[in-house]
């Protein structure tokens, strides 16, 4: 590394010019960077579940609805019906709203001997005045599966309005519609005092993007500010503040510029890159500057001090950057694109920032005046930790090992739940609306079934009864509220009964094709093959409940739907497939991170050194998983990344301490002296970098995203535990066991 330092100092103008040129290229690409959060960010184009979902969209289209609901003590009063009609009309005038559907706007298809005709389902003049009229209206509602649970609750106390969006289904359309809806409902709330709930995929997408924009505008300035304050308080030099921050800012430009060049969008998860690159880059700079500050007091020139810093601290800094990059890079094995991209670009950003640091710091600090290190003061500070760890080494090692094993069993209680509704905090209107819809209406989630068969297969009584039986079976589940299919349309024009013959089925379909307000293509398409859908409305479910519903559907299809192809898709169907990828990502990425990082430790420290490093790094990981299980944390898109990332971060302090210890023990041949002196040398830097990382990850806890709050909390906890383990367990192990054998030229004895 000394040679590399000499090359950088001598060729500084070339390296600075190359950095400037690359920065310009990446900065120009930032204009093409896009924000996206849809199925393409969750599943690759060749993913079977994505292919099935695209097939479903090809046949039945991608319908995007917003549901608005409010409570009414007596929704059938004339004044309430008039208000419902008024609100339905006003919401229908919002941007990109194609249709506004409520009890006051839908049409009821009535079959007569002469054919069928349609009329408004509920008009102000239809307000019931007698008990018989109330019973008649209630019977009409209960007999229409498209009404009860969607447009009015079962207890008749909540009214719903369904808004269908037109346009290109882009984030701009969703944002314009959602924000206009918010403004209109706020106005209605001020005028009437009513409380409105609204939700649906367009609203969710808009809220997530709003959170994303807020986090980006918050994370970058706040992490830079905290890092600036930390660097100035530590080094009291403007160069020691500007140069590390310049390195991380350029590193971010390179990272997001590369994302733009290869067409990788910004997702809710990738917003973490801003804070991650900043805090990890600054932490690396702290180690390098701290060692340079020590060498300034030992050498007669700044150039010699810089070259010695490269020789002694360069390799550990490189190794810590590599281990952190490996921790993130292990996520590239995920089948989830947004997780895979996070791992790849985080690794690129961390290594890029390290390279920038290794150029900008040596060039910029050569002529700088830096306050010398308070070595004597720090020695007194860390003497207590060193003595405690060395004097109680065996007891400390045994207790920590037993504690790690015991707490790790808590990880067996971790549940997997990547529900995107839970991306937002419980105080979010979207989360509150989802909970409200689960209680009052037919739920906030859905499973779609695509059923395909031979031509004409759905024009038979056998197929109609089969679908009806399937719906009845599914609706037996506690978390399933309702299901809809072409069978419900057929019943609506068949006096609420199933047809008794194939001719009656064909007649019902013929009537429906001619009826006003009925879109047969919504649930039934007859092409070269017959295709139909069954829409299943569900409440928010955990993984076991969702698996039970899907398993029963697949079992029913295998037993009673021979000759038909049944595909489970839709929002919850995709979530179930994503769940499998979540579990695989956590297991495999952590295994890869452990194997690669231990391999690097093996190369750098040898077999005994790698073995000695296991316990201090196993403690924070064991505590992380154990706490997640015991505290009820779930594996989701944020927490699945914590273990692999923390594996890369917590090992950094171990590397620096082990590197200093090895140099000292090969010189002194006394393990206890080397353990104490290594802690004196590097303890302050470990504390500063840990504090820097903790403050940086604490920024995530200010996010409006529940996922990122959990990510920040867990990372902070793991880093603190890792630091405590490295200043206690590491000295205990290295002072008790002959990990690094002295060389031939080593000094020995107490004097050394």
Image: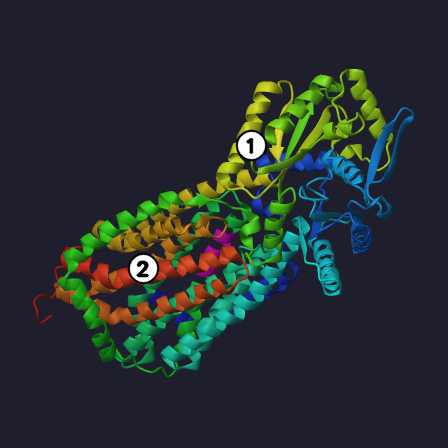
Among the two numbered marks 1 and 2 on one chain, the one whose residue lies closer to the N terminus:
1
Q: Residue at x 44, y 53 (%)?
A: 328
Q: Is residue 347 magenta?
A: yes
725 relative position to 489: left or right: left
Nearer the observer, 143 or 663:
143
Question: Which residue is under mark 1?
Answer: 550
Q: Secondary structure at mark 1?
A: helix
Q: Residue at x 68, y 58 (%)?
A: 195
Nearer the observer, 66 or 504:
504
Q: Residue at x 43, y 79 (%)?
A: 239
The reply to whether residue 526 is in sight is no
Which quarter of the rendering shows the C terminus? bottom left
Residue 79: percent from left, percent from top:
81, 54
Q: Kindly indicate the quadrant of the structure image that contains residue 736.
A: bottom left
Task: Give the farthest residue toward the right.
Answer: 114
Residue 100: percent from left, percent from top:
79, 48
Q: Residue at x 53, y 37 (%)?
A: 546
Q: Is residue 478 above or below residue 403?
A: above
Image: magenta residue range: 342-351
368 relative position to 127: left or right: left
Residue 270: percent from left, percent from top:
54, 56
In the rendering, which numbered label is found on residue 102?
Answer: none
Q: Kindly indicate the quadrant of the structure image that contains residue 358.
A: bottom left
Q: CA distance from mark 1 to mark 2?
A: 42 Å
Q: Is residue 596 magenta?
A: no
- Mainly helix, strand or loop, the magenta region? helix
266 relative position to 702: left or right: right
Q: Label 1 crowding class (10 Å Cα cut-off): few <14, some 14-19, many 20+?
A: some
Q: Secondary structure at mark 2?
A: helix
In the rendering, which numbered label is found on residue 722?
Answer: 2
């Amino acid at each position: 590394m000394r040679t590399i330092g000499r090359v950088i100092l001598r060729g500084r103008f070339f390296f600075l010019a190359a950095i400037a040129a690359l920065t310009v290229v990446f900065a120009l690409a930032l204009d093409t960077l896009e924000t996206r959060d849809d199925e393409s960010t969750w599943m690759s184009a060749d993913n079977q579940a994505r292919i099935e979902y695209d097939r479903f969209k090809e046949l039945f289209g991608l319908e995007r609805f917003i549901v608005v609901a409010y409570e009414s003590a007596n929704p059938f009063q004339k004044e309430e019906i008039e208000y419902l009609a008024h609100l339905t009309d006003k919401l229908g005038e919002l941007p990109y709203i194609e249709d506004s559907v409520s009890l006051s706007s839908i049409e009821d298809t009535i079959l007569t001997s002469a054919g069928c005709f349609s009329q408004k389902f509920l008009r102000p003049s239809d307000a019931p005045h007698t008990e018989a009229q109330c019973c008649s209206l209630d019977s009409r509602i209960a007999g229409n599966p498209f009404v009860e649970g969607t447009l009015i609750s079962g207890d008749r106390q909540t009214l719903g309005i369904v808004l269908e969006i037109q346009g290109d289904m882009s984030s701009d359309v969703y944002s314009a519609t959602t924000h206009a809806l918010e403004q209109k409902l706020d106005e209605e709330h001020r005028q009437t005092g009513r409380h409105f709930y609204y939700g649906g995929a367009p609203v969710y997408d808009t809220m997530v993007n709003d959170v994303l924009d807020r986090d980006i505008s918050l994370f970058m300035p706040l992490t830079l500010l905290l890092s600036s304050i930390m660097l100035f308080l530590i080094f009291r030099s403007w160069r020691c503040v500007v140069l590390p921050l310049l390195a991380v800012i350029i590193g971010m430009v390179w990272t997001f510029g590369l994302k733009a060049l290869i067409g990788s969008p910004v997702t809710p998860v990738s917003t973490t890159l801003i804070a991650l690159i900043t805090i990890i880059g600054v932490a690396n700079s702290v180690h390098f500057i701290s060692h340079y500050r020590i060498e300034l007091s030992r050498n007669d020139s700044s150039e010699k001090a810089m070259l010695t810093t490269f020789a002694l601290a360069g390799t550990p800094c490189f190794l810590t950057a590599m281990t952190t990059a490996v921790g993130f890079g292990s996520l590239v094995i995920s089948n989830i694109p947004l997780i895979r991209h996070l791992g790849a670009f985080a690794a690129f950003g961390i290594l890029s920032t390290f390279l920038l640091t290794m150029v900008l710091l040596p060039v910029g600090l050569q002529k700088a005046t830096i306050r010398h290190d308070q070595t004597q003061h720090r020695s007194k500070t860390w003497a207590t930790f060193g003595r405690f760890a060395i004097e109680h080494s065996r007891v400390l090692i045994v207790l920590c090992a037993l504690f790690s094993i015991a707490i790790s069993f808590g990880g067996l209680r971790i549940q997997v739940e990547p529900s995107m509704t839970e991306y937002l905090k419980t105080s979010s209107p979207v989360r509150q609306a989802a909970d409200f819809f689960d209680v009052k209406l037919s739920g906030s989630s859905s499973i779609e079934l695509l059923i395909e068969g031979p031509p004409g297969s759905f024009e038979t009584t056998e197929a109609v009864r089969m679908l009806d039986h399937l719906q009845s079976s599914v609706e037996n589940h506690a978390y399933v509220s309702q299901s809809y299919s072409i069978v419900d349309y057929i019943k609506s024009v068949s006096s609420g009964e199933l047809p008794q013959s194939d001719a009656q089925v064909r007649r019902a379909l013929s009537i429906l094709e001619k009826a006003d307000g009925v879109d047969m293509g919504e649930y039934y398409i007859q092409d070269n093959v017959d295709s139909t859908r069954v829409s299943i409305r569900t409440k928010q479910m955990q993984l076991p409940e969702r698996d039970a519903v899907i398993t029963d559907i697949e079992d029913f299809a295998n037993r009673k739907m021979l000759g038909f192809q049944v595909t489970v898709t839709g929002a919850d169907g995709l979530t179930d497939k994503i769940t499998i990828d979540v579990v695989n990502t956590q297991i495999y990425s952590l295994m890869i991170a452990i194997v690669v990082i231990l391999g690097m430790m093996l190369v750098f420290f040898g077999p005994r050194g790698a073995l000695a490093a296991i316990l201090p790094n196993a403690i924070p990981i064991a505590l992380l998983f154990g706490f997640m299980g015991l505290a009820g944390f779930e594996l989701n898109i944020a927490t699945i990344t914590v273990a692999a990332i923390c594996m890369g971060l917590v090992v950094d302090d171990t590397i620096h301490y082990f590197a200093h210890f090895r140099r000292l023990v090969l010189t002194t041949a006394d393990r206890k002296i080397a353990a104490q002196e290594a802690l004196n040398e590097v303890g302050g830097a470990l504390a500063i970098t840990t504090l820097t990382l903790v403050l940086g990850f604490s920024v995530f806890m200010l996010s409006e995203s529940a996922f990122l709050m959990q990510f920040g909390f867990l990372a902070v906890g793991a880093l603190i535990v890792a630091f405590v383990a490295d200043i206690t367990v590491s000295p205990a192990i290295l002072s008790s066991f002959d990990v690094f054998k002295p060389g031939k030229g080593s000094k020995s004895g107490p004097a050394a």
